Amino acid sequence: MPNEFKGKFRVEVSPNVGPFEVKTQEQWHTVTDFEALRRPPHVVPVPYCAAAPRLDGDLSEWRDVPFVPLPLEGGRPSSFRLCWREEGLYGAASVQDATPNAFPDDPLRRDSVHVYIEKDNAFSLDLTPETLHIAMMPAHGLRPGECSLSGFHAGEDVLLPEDVKARRALIQTYWKPTDEGYVIEFLITAKALRPAAMEPGTTLGLMLVLSDDGRILEYFRSQEDPIAWRRPYCWGVVRLER
Ligand SMILES: [Ca+2]
Ligand SMILES: [Ca+2]
């Protein structure tokens, strides 16, 4: 049993709880599949987009961008697309949902698109200052426009300022109802992604979650875990390519 994992976590055998536990900072995590920590995740390329997508709910400019695969669930991915430019990471979600709803106070149990990013792609065992989580939801009143948003940085609700101008400097979104459900287009700006550089070769830990009335329809991640949301080593990996 190694005493070190990736040079930053202490791994100790615990005779009391399961096979062993991993200690990060002040918390203990029981790890039942230690080999999984070493398993290289599926790396998904993110293409460069020559022209900036317009955040307007029209996804025609995404036509040639492949859908983000679902490494664990299999099946045909049909919701998420990503591309990047110097100004940040763009995304589009096309969601089939007969009952789009808007309950921004409870994003995990309602209709929502979640983006989790580990900016240093360190496969950390817990949230760190380099992780962020953005939840995008159909907005109040179900009128097209900016999404209802909540955002967390390192597990704390400090990512998205109340001030609209300051918030748009970090995250820009647009949502629109469609015949099948709704679409969301977003830009997570380079500023929000620092210190990750917007250049070819940059890798980001990434988890995408699509939730319909609290039921998860699609997941982009590399490992199953009931609390994957706070375990970046379970997330997938994307690489910016040109
Ligand atoms: Ca568009
Ligand atoms: Ca719904």
Image (cartoon, helix red, strand yellow):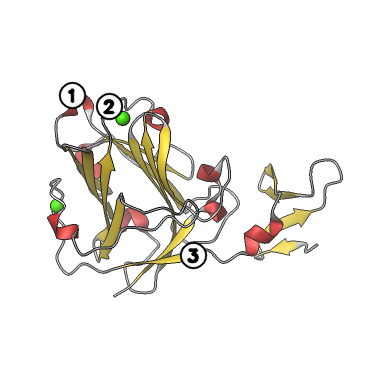
Whether residue 146 is situated above or below residue 68 in the rendered picture: above
Tell me, yes or no, whether the two marked residues, 1 and 2, touch with CB atoms within 8 Å.
yes
Name the residue rendered at 40%, 62% in the picture: 195
| Residues at marks 3 and 2, CA–CA distance in whole angstroms | 33 Å
Q: Nearer the viewer, residue 181 or 161?
A: 181
Q: Earlier in the sequence, mark 3 or mark 1?
A: 3
Label 3: few (<14), some (14–19) or many (≥20) C-alpha neighbours in 10 Å = some
State which quadrant residue 141 falls in. Answer: top left
Camera-nearest label, 3 or 1? 3
- Where 121 falls versus 112 (above or below)? below
Q: Indicate the amino acid at tag 3.
A: His
Which of these two is toward me, 103 or 166?
103
- Is label 1's Cβ within 8 Å of ligand 2? no
- Residue 199 placement (x, y as % from top left): 32, 71
Distance, label 1 to label 2, CA atoms, is 8 Å
Identity of the amino acid at label 1? Gly
Residue that mark 1 sits on: 141
Q: Secondary structure at mark 2?
A: loop
**What residue sits right under mark 2 in the picture?**
102
Q: Residues within 10 Å of mark 2 (few under 14, many from 20)?
A: many
Residue ID at (50%, 54%): 72
Left or right of 17 on screen, residue 189: left
Q: Gap between marks 3 and 1, in whole Å?
A: 39 Å
Residue 213, given in percent of the width and then of the height, sits at 37, 28
Residue 74 x %, y %: 45, 54
Question: Element at badge 3?
Answer: loop
Q: Quadrant of residue 68?
A: bottom left
The residue at 34%/36% (across/down) is 112
